[in-house]
Amino acid sequence: NWTTTNVVEEQVALIREQVGDKRAICGLSGGVDSAVAAALVQKAIGSQLTCVYVDHGLMRKGETEQVEKDFVAATGAKLKVVDAEKRFLDALAGVSDPEEKRKIIGREFIRVFEQAQLEILQEDGPEVAFLVQGTLYPDVVESGGGTGTANIKSHHNVGGLPDDIEFQLVEPLRQLFKDEVRMVGQELGLPEEIVQRQPFPGPGLGIRIVGEVTKDRLDLLREADAIAREELTAAGLDRDIWQCPVVLLADVRSVGVQGDGRTYGHPIVLRPVSSEDAMTADWSRLPYETLARISTRITNEVADVNRVVLDVTSKPPGTIEWE
Ligand code: XMP
């Protein structure tokens, strides 16, 4: 019979058998799947696991700390955090095109991750033979099945990994759906903020700034996003919406009147959506009082923002993210 306790016990036994006395590494993205996979493997093999988290500086407020503190506190996992903010911002300087931004972020991410892998491989200890991935059942089905014995070869063209390193995959969530993964995460003692997280794109806030990505703009957007999240949570709406991107229109300015006089600031877009699978979506009919609170707080508390607008477009025709 299916219980989370049984799933955890069964997977822990399987992982121990698979990994033996070797070591494993796992990339954490800040998302639910990688966190639960890592927590399961940690429970099975403890210090034989090293987790890697690349902080690209495009995370939302408190997210890196959540991985650094809450995840480690809940699991006791060995965590290598790579601060790569400067590297990413340098690479993104002067770039406004959405696809170009995505490519740069993806490329830098792989480079930094592989460099971290290389450093772990060079540490003393048993052989590192396993790579943990948070693959879910729908991912397995979509990619046409598979037997779980796949060997993946690390990209040896970047980061300088030796050609002959192959990792065997450990994929303890292969038979689970998202809601089951959340339950397993809960069973493993992961905090609610990690387990109930809404989807957040890999390129992070980098694709929620329409225009060039700079540190100042990121800081501004982080503040606005934190306010929106806080108010949505306070209003008890987290489970009603799929996600709510908060977008900065950095290349747009409009005239406002604030405090002592005229301002010429940027708009912030709220994009709350409801969806089943993100393939299609509808804009969420949020209560006016909640929208009003978010708007008042953002314009009062975030410098350089003098307007908050609501995106009332479904998907299609609009995508969920603006870039
Ligand atoms: P769109 O904007 O295509 O988004 O309607 C659909 C869902 O995917 C998320 N998203 C991403 N997730 N890497 C990710 O891991 C990405 O590059 C990425 N782009 C979009 C988006 O937040 C939404 O949930």
Image: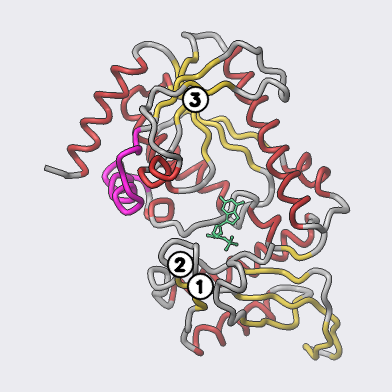
Q: CA distance from mark 1 to mark 3?
A: 35 Å
Question: Of helix, strand and loop, which one carries label 2?
Answer: loop
Q: Residue at the location (82% across, 43% down)? A: 91
Amino acid of disc 2: Trp
Q: What quarter of the picture does the C terminus occupy?
A: bottom right
Labels 1 & 3 near each other (Cβ < 8 A): no
Q: Quadrant of ligand 1?
A: bottom right
> How many neighbours does mark 2 have within 10 angstroms: few (below 14), some (14-19), or many (20 or more)?
many
Labels 1 & 2 near each other (Cβ < 8 A): yes
Q: Whole-percent x and y of residue 75?
A: 38, 36
Badge 1 is on which residue? 273
Instruction: Give whichever of 203, 235 is nearer the camera.
Output: 203
Q: What quarter of the picture does the N terminus occupy?
A: top left
Question: Of helix, strand and loop, which one carries label 3?
Answer: strand
Q: Residue at the location (34% across, 33% down)? A: 172
Instruction: Give whichever of 41, 242 is nearer the camera.
Output: 242
Q: Horizontal placement of 316 versus 85: left or right?
A: left
Numbered badge on residue 242: 2
Q: CA distance from mark 1 to mark 2?
A: 6 Å
Is residue 16 covered in magenta?
A: no
Amino acid of disc 1: Val
Given this view, does label 2 or label 3 mark the residue nearer the observer?
Answer: 2
Amino acid of disc 3: Ile
Badge 3 is on which residue? 25
Give the magenta part as a residue range.
172-190
Question: Of helix, strand and loop, which one carries label 1?
Answer: strand
Q: CA distance from mark 2 to mark 3?
A: 31 Å
Given this view, does label 1 or label 3 mark the residue nearer the observer?
Answer: 1
